[in-house]
Image (cartoon, rainbow, N blue to C red):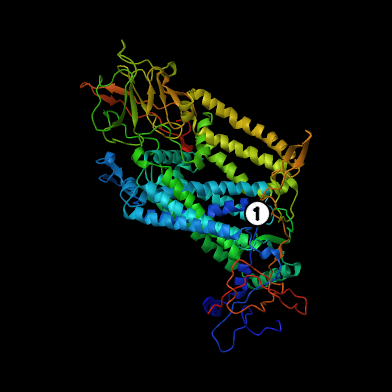
């Protein structure tokens, strides 16, 4: 301690008998240039920071007014943003230009412990650990058994109970033999309802709006002599009667990642999935010719009943939508 | 007053020692070190705006008839999640601003994490002893991306709902366990009723808690190991040079918090983001054009689009097409990313400790490799806009797609050697990146020309100084003899007071001269 001071400003020694305590002033060297503030023109820097703060204050007040008067998001956002911008700019100018310019340094001591310290740590851990574990193999195994059973058992509330097993629900939709084709309002579709090139999203009447049952009914051609659209050679004769009167129906669930394949271009007879742009040729059993889709869209076999309504001969003959591990080549 | 307050705490916690260390903690000064701060402060903005949103958002898939203030949707069946988000936008005062600041804040959050990660990568800050921090940081990136996806899916609108459908298919594509994982996550087959409430819990509670804890670990390690620094005057591996915590860094960083909030607020005021009322309620049989995810998922969407239509089927099982771009690619991406410090240590056979950063130009191979890999993901990100690009450039979708397939391979192959050469060139140029002094051509009276080096411009001459140590083991002596009590009122002028030299040669004198006494 310096011997010629016994109190006064900045000594850190409280004056006896008074409540005045002075803050000790840490110091290194009184001449050190690092302690000069950074600004060459402190007045200007202070005015800049002050202006920024005042602008911020005005903007915050503006925010208050805008909120009170329920102005639009534009005014709420600009006032709030300018308020923070002013406050922030002021703080940054203050911190950069009106504080000691530095640089200062501190030591970066090695974090690595000495060999001796490490040995002591390992020794403490191992020696007392040894006393606990030595010849207690049975206890360790018993604890292991209990923890193991807890681990297995916890999988049930934490994982298994989250949802049902998939079982066969990915294989079947709600389409059945005889299901009517209805649109989203529930109206049954008749032959003649669509123009050539027209299409509509249809569902079975039992599952209107269903994510997996959604089907695209497209009128491709005028009625033909045979009464049915000819399927591609590899699907003859299986699909000979699936597309009556120039109407054809495919699953709307893209076989790539499940988006609804909702676009149809009549000129090229192509369905386009808007998500990743897979193209399916309708006249070739919705085989993908472009984009990442790997498999054709499943086709719904149709017939027209005696009242003229479209109905499904059966459900889809394969799982609809994107693939999964279990389905193999179904 | 400060004195008695401090004493009250010190009596109970004994904080003067560690407190002083904290006050004198040094923060190296480089603009690129601020990027991590942007990430931290945008997280705070997310927390604050997010709390506001949780007070009004209803995480339920139950269908209600919308009857709020947005007329075009009146009478439409929508989920409560969607309806509450529309109400937040139009009926809650300031709600739209909070929604916008939250969404923009999330974009800034992920973006700043990516840029910060690039800074760490290109300057070699991930090397020993900071590999652990790199692991924590790259995990934070994954969690931030995932939480962002969960967050923008909560309003249950048509665009984000399509993304959820794709996410279900991606989980489904995992071999062996995919169908089980998808059904457990969704509480059944798609779409079910559980996905919005579950996303909500993950987005609001679980992931923010994990992210906050990891940020704590990230900063804790930073405090313990201290920040790295570039080479410079007085910079040594065994010191840290920069500005002290008090008062400089606290002032600057508080300002930076305000500025980050300001930018988020101004973006929210001026640029509309996620107008879900225009998209409508999600239903699984409807879809729109130009359905892209948020930008940080763009590389995944682009990969899904440009992937050829391969699918593996054999022995009664299938590895679906979506597995390769959406599970395998991210798996490899994040795997290599997390393991990078160890990979590089092995490749360079360098297992020593590093506290000084490298300039990217001084490690041309690493810089070129990083640039090439980043360009690959940037091409994938661009590929997520194939349909929009085909529309705006009036080019066929076929051309756009094939171009991106070639670009995904070709661009990195070009970026690598170009970046390498640029690094080598920069190494050779003296004072590259610093302002040059002009040579001014002067004509004499006789008519001859000569060149004269220009004057230094104001601000160019920032004299560099040696750093002044603020360590606890340097002896400090408080002294301000000759100063009148109360000080002389001057704030800026730090005039040295005349002080007798101390007998033992230790430094004497005063800095932050307090002109007043504190009672």
In the rendered structure, the answer to whether residue B59 lies left or right of residue B77 reads right
* Secondary structure type for disc 1: helix
Toward which corner of the image does residue A182 lie, by quadrant? top left
A139 or A278: nearer the viewer:
A278
Residue situated in front as seen by the camera: B266 or B446: B446
Q: Position of residue B505 (x, y in %)?
A: 77, 76
Who is closer to the viewer here, B350 or A242? B350
Position in image of residue B54 (x %, y %)? 38, 55
Question: How many labels were placed on the picture?
Answer: 1
Residue lying furthest front in this view?
A: B445
Q: Give the labeled residue for mark 1.
A: B131
List the single residue furthest toward the top.
Answer: A225
- How packed mark 1 is, by other alpha carbons closer than 10 Å (few <14, some 14-19, many 20 or more), is some
Q: Is residue B147 visible?
A: no
Q: Is residue B469 shown left or right of residue B137?
A: right
Q: Is residue B488 visible in the rendered structure shown here?
A: yes
Q: Name which quarter of the figure residue A45 lies in.
A: bottom right
Q: Position of residue B86 (x, y in %)?
A: 33, 46
Residue depicted at x 41% and y 49%: A77
Q: Is residue B510 left or right of residue B505?
A: left
Query: Where is A42 relative to B75, above or below?
Result: below
**Placement of B130 over or under B89, stated as above or below:** below
């Amino acid at each position: 301690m310096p011997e010629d001071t016994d109190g006064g400003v900045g000594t850190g020694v409280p004056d006896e008998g008074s409540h005045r305590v002075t803050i000790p002033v840490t110091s290194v060297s009184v001449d050190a240039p690092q302690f000069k503030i950074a600004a060459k023109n402190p007045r200007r820097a202070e005015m800049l920071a002050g202006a920024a703060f005042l602008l911020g204050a005005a903007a915050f007040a503006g925010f208050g007014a805008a909120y009170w008067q329920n102005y639009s998001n534009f005014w709420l956002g600009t006032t709030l943003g300018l308020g923070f911008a002013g406050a922030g700019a002021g703080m940054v100018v203050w911190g950069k230009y009106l504080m000691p310019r530095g640089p200062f340094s501190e030591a970066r001591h090695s974090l690595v412990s000495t060999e001796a310290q490490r040995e002591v740590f390992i020794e403490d851990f191992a020696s007392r650990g040894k006393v606990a574990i030595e010849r207690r193999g049975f206890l360790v195994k018993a604890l292991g058994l209990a923890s193991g059973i807890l681990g297995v058992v916890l999988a049930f509330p934490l994982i298994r109970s989250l949802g049902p097993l998939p079982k066969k629900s990915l294989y079947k939709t709600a389409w059945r033999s005889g299901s009517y084709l209805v649109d989203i309002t529930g109206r049954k579709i008749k032959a003649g309802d669509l123009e050539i090139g027209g299409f509509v999203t249809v569902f079975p009447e039992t599952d209107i709006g269903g994510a997996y049952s959604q089907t695209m009914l497209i009128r491709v051609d005028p009625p033909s002599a045979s009464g049915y659209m000819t399927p591609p050679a590899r699907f003859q004769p299986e699909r000979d009667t699936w597309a009556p009167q120039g109407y054809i129906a495919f699953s709307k669930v893209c076989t790539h990642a499940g988006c609804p394949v909702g676009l149809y271009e009549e000129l090229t007879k192509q369905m386009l999935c808007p998500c990743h742009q897979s193209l399916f040729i309708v006249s070739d059993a919705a085989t993908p010719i472009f984009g990442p889709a790997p498999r054709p869209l499943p086709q719904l076999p149709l017939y027209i009943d005696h009242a003229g309504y479209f109905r499904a001969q059966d459900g889809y003959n394969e799982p609809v939508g994107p693939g999964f591990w279990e389905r193999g080549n179904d | 007053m400060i004195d008695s307050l401090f004493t009250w705490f010190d009596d109970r916690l004994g904080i003067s020692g560690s407190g002083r260390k904290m006050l004198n903690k040094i923060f190296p000064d480089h603009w690129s070190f601020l990027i991590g701060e942007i990430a931290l402060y945008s997280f705070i903005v997310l927390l604050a705006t997010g709390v506001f949103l949780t007070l009004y958002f209803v995480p339920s898939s139950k269908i209600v008839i919308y009857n709020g203030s947005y007329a075009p949707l009146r009478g439409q069946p929508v989920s409560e999640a969607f309806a509450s988000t529309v109400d937040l936008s139009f009926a809650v005062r300031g709600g739209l601003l909070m929604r916008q600041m939250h969404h923009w804040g999330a974009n800034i959050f992920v973006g700043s994490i990516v840029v910060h990660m690039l800074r760490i990568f290109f300057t070699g800050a991930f090397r020993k002893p900071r590999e652990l921090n790199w692991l924590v940081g790259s995990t934070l990136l994954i969690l931030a991306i995932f939480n962002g996806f969960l967050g923008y899916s909560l309003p249950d609108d048509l665009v984000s709902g399509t993304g959820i459908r794709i996410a279900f298919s991606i989980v489904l594509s995992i071999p062996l366990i995919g169908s089980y994982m998808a059904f457990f996550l969704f509480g059944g087959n798609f779409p079910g009723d559980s996905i919005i409430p579950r996303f909500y819990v993950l987005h609001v509670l679980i992931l923010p808690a994990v992210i906050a804890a990891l940020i704590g670990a990230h900063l804790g390690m930073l405090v313990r190991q201290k920040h790295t620094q570039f080479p410079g005057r007085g910079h040594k591996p065994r010191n840290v040079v920069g500005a002290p915590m008090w008062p400089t860094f606290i002032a600057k960083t508080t300002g930076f918090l305000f500025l980050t909030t300001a930018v988020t607020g101004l973006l929210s005021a001026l640029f509309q983001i996620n107008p879900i009322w225009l998209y409508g309620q999600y239903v699984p049989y409807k879809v729109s054009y130009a359905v892209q995810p948020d930008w940080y998922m763009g590389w995944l969407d682009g990969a899904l689009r440009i992937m050829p239509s391969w699918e593996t089927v054999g022995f009664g099982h299938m590895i679906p097409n979506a597995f390769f771009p959406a599970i395998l690619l991210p798996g490899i991406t994040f795997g290599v990313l997390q393991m990078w410090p160890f990979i590089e240590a092995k490749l360079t056979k360098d297992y020593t400790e590093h506290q000084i950063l490298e300039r990217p130009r001084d490690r041309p191979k690493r810089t070129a490799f990083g640039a090439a890999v980043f360009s690959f993901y940037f091409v994938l990100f661009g590929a997520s806009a194939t349909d929009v690009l085909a529309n705006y450039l009036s080019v066929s979708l076929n051309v756009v797609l094939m171009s991106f397939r070639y670009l995904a391979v070709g661009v990195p192959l070009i970026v690598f050697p170009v970046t390498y050469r640029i690094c080598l060139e920069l190494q050779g140029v003296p004072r590259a990146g610093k302002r040059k002094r002009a040579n001014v051509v002067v004509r004499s009276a006789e008519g001859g020309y000569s060149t004269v080096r220009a004057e230094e411009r104001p601000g160019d001459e920032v004299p560099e100084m040696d750093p002044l140590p603020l360590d606890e083991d340097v002896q400090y002596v408080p002294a301000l003899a000759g100063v009148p009590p109360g000080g002389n009122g001057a704030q800026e002028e730090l005039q040295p007071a005349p002080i007798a030299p101390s007998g033992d040669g230790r430094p004497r004198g005063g800095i932050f001269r307090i002109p007043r006494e504190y009672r």
